[in-house]
Image (cartoon, rainbow, N blue to C red):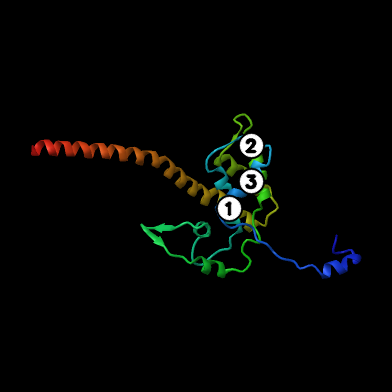
Amino acid sequence: KFQSEHTNEAILDRIVKINVPYVLELDQEVKIYEKLIGRSDFDSHIAPHTLQVAAMFSVLSRLKPSNKVDALTKMKIYNGEEIVEKGLIKKVDIKDLREEVEDEGMTGISTRFIMKALDNALSDNVRENCIHPLNVREALVQMVKAGDFPDDTRKQYLEFLQDTLHKEYLEILEKEITKPFVYSYQEQAESLFQTYLDHAEAYVN
């Protein structure tokens, strides 16, 4: 509308359009959600990893395909994480990934889309007054299915939600559940070791 007004020609002639991409770092995207939620009236419980899962989907949707790595690995590299395969750290130069494409981050799921999904997830879970990764993921699935996306884009987004993120969340859970057992085993192993030393010392004596 502004461009169609002939009286704005002088202003338009002095305007330079600068395309600013979406955030491509997972941790930074999570911080954006936390900031928006902190400024709102949202006072419900947010389960661990809920915002992280939502951010994973938005960042994955903004990344262009790479010939070097899959989308999930690319997301982790952009986030500064070390990629470990078969016990070895996989060396992938982030500069090479960025140089593969020119307009990465210019398309994909917006922050507004994610915030609406969080709101929908809470609306579906008013009684418990909380949101968690599973109901947020389901809210995102429903929004993608109902959204005005090209068929191939919709298919890719649903694959991210129903396959890629599902597997990644299971891995996150596995690590979280294993942690307490590892710590508790550490204490148990220490106790066994001390008992062994006592027995060895007694035997020698």
Crowding at dot 2, Cα within 10 Å, few <14 / some 14-19 / many 20+, comes out as: many
Q: Which quadrant would the C terminus be assigned to in this image?
A: top left
Q: Going by the image, does 116 lie left or right of 71?
A: right
The residue wearing badge 3 is 35
Give SS at disc 2.
Answer: helix
Q: Can you give x and y, in whole percent of width and height, for residue 38 in the image?
A: 64, 41
Q: Which of 13 and 114 is in front in this view?
A: 13
Q: Give the amino acid at mark 1.
A: Gln
In the rendered image, the vertical position of residue 133 relative to residue 94, given as above or below? above
Q: Is residue 159 visible?
A: no
In the rendered image, the vertical position of residue 58 relative to residue 101, given as above or below? above
Q: Can you give x and y, in whole percent of width and height, for residue 142 in the image?
A: 64, 44
- At x 48%, y 67%, the residue is 93
The residue wearing badge 1 is 28
Q: Give the amino acid at mark 3.
A: Lys
Quarter occupied by residue 191:
top left
Earlier sequence position, callout 2 versus callout 3: 3
Q: Are marks 2 and 1 in contact (CB under 8 Å)?
A: no
The nearer-to-camera label among 2 and 3 is: 3
Earlier sequence position, callout 3 versus callout 1: 1
Give SS at disc 3.
Answer: helix
Q: Give the amino acid at mark 2.
A: Leu
Residue 189 image label: none
Task: Tell me the CA gap for discs 2 and 3.
Answer: 18 Å
Q: Going by the image, does 142 lie left or right of 75?
A: right
Task: Tell me the CA gap for discs 2 and 1.
Answer: 23 Å
Task: Tell me the CA gap for discs 3 and 1.
Answer: 11 Å
Give SS at disc 1.
Answer: helix
Q: Do the residues labelled 3 and 1 touch (CB within 8 Å)?
A: no
Q: State the residue lying farthest toward the left.
A: 205
Residue 122 image label: 2
Crowding at dot 3, Cα within 10 Å, few <14 / some 14-19 / many 20+, comes out as: few
